[in-house]
Image (cartoon, coloured by chain):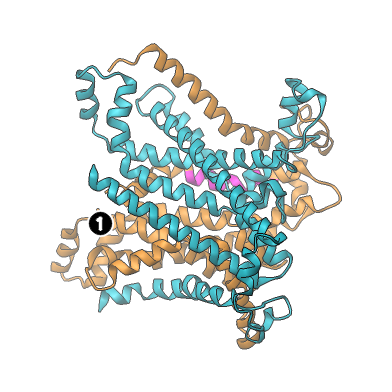
Chain colours: A cyan, B orange
Amino acid sequence: MLPYLLLVPAVILELLIHIVPMLVGIGISFLKLTQFYIANWRQAPNAGLANYRYALDFNSAAGKQLLHSFFVTIIFTVIVLVVSWTFGMAAAVFTQRPFPGRGIVRTIFLIPYALPVFASVITWNFMLQRDNGAVNHVLVDQLHLAGGDRPFWLIGQNSFYSLVIVEVWRTWPFAFLMLTAGMQSISQDLYEAAGLDGAGVWAQFRGVTLPMLRPVNRVLLLVLFLWTFNDFTTPFTLFGKGAPHQADIISMHIYQNSFVTWNFGTGSAMSVLLLIFLLVVTGGYLRLAKSGSNDA
Amino acid sequence: MREPMWFKWTRAIGLAVLALFALIPVWVMVTSALKPLADVQERFTWWPSHLSAKPFVEMWKTIPLADYFVNSLVVSTVASIASVVVALLAAYSLSRYRFRGRQAFSVVVLSTQMFPGILFLLPLYVIFVNLGNTTGLQLYGSRTGLIVTYMTFTLPFAIWMLAGYLDSVPRELDEAAKVDGCGPLGAFMRVVIPAAMPGIVAVLIYAFMTAWGEVLFASVLTDDSTRTLAVGLQGYATQNNVYWNQIMAAALTVSVPIVVGFLVLQRYLVAGMTAGSVK
């Protein structure tokens, strides 16, 4: 009996904040829940599948925008994932062996992760300002690039690159942290044995470090994918309530569709579609990872 | 092993570039916080030409920063402590007992971690508003609503990390305590908790940081009187003037305690993460 009793508080909270809202959310996605009905949602008229048809009608403006937002998010996630992992891995390998100043370097690398997101991203927002920002100061005033024009970084096509850079800045230290932690459990003997066999730095990385980090990487890549794909805080702090079209990633898109236009039915339908997508991707990934580990 | 020259050079350059990338925003934040308003409205300069401490004084007046600070402090403190207590109980159960539904519980709790926050936000908002209308229980716009939400938010990761930590506390310790006449609760309180203290501290920091930096739910579930720093800081930009120096001063002020706490205790956090992930 005791093991169940110990779980009761956790179960109640999970039910209250996660499970029940999720079920309610699925329910709402079948309702025509606009701002008139929010205070009394049981009176909202039934919409059947209309919200889903609205979101998935790729001939209409709404459907096209959702599809656009979905692809922007995919590209954004893939770039951020690859770059963050590469930076994190490089930093972890470079700091694997002791050298003077290693502790300081590691601490510096963790600062972007330790800073509260809203505080650091608002600083990036300042840096990316057109007239008084640091980025244009470097590019235009100091390096004389861009032909004398001061480009905008928070609207237009550049806003996508800005979002990628800021997201990488705040994500790669986490990859570094996880990979560093994983490397600490690799036995030094393995490197010595490889060294005796004549393996150089690169061969040791390929032959010892990468294979030994496989369990960490398996978790890390999934976590990075989900965090980046679902991230809201960075674009919201960088752009405000409405993201530019070119950087309109999915969580911002749904937020905009729900709280700016007050149409909760379609917002919920989009959330449910997003959930299904994430379930399929995660399920497929875990299955692949499992069969991969059986082969190894 | 001897490191070849090319590796040493690549390492030096790579580390320098990454350190620069990590630190530039910090430099901008610190120096801009010390500039007079005119200097942050004109062309950016890497070195402040005049130093001014005024932004740190005026930032409290432009927006009700102190109120936001108190809100953030209360919400983050209560939510993180409560979350650790709840997670500790669950983690102890998962680590020490084998029972039906154990696997299912872990899977369900951990999988909520992968769902987008927006999925819970809309229904939670609707539930809070309707609960207030029908029962008078004010969760929308209250600190309580935010605390309960944040507690649950950090629960999956907290349970996962603590269960990993408790697994590393030998069961023999519990048994020895029971032989000495402690009940299961006594063994838990007097033996397991002290042994798992580094893990508990790590989870506490993680939960506090998460609550302190959360924006999505705070932007919807709070009103003017319960607004937290994460949302409130945007207030400097909606005035007629954008007080960039005050924004940077405020951002710096709300970051320092978090960064210092994190850096002091990073060892525990790293150890806690590996306890959960590397098995």
List the single residue furthest toward the front.
A59
For residue A198, above or below residue A123: above
Residue hosting label 1: B167
At horizontal 72% and vertical 46% (from top left) the residue drawn is B247
At horizontal 28% and vertical 38% (from top left) the residue drawn is A185
At horizontal 48% and vertical 45% (from top left) the residue drawn is B262
Q: Is residue A35 left or right of residue A89?
A: right
The amino acid pointed to by label 1 is Asp
Give A197 or B201, whichever is nearer the viewer.
A197
Mark 1 falls on what kind of element?
A: helix
**Residue B258 on the magenta span:** yes
Residue B79 spot, x, y in % from top left: 51, 64
List the single residue furthest toward the left.
B179
Q: Is residue B6 visible?
A: yes
Q: Is residue B269 visible?
A: no
Residue A127 spot, x, y in % from top left: 71, 36
Q: Is residue A16 left or right of residue A247?
A: left
Residue A111 spot, x, y in % from top left: 53, 39
Q: Is disc 1 surrounded by few (<14), some (14 to 19) or many (20+) residues within 10 Å? A: some
Q: Chain of mark 1?
A: B
Specify the quadrant of the image occupied by residue B201: bottom left
Most common SS among magenta residues: helix
Give A277 or B275, whichever is nearer the viewer.
A277
For residue A112, above or below residue B92: above
Image quarter where the C terminus of chain A lies is top left
Residue A260 spot, x, y in % from top left: 73, 64
Q: Is residue B85 left or right of residue A225?
A: left
Specify the quadrant of the image occupied by residue B126: bottom right
**Residue B216 on the magenta span:** no
- The span picked out in magenta is B250-262
At horizontal 55% and vertical 39% (from top left) the residue drawn is A168
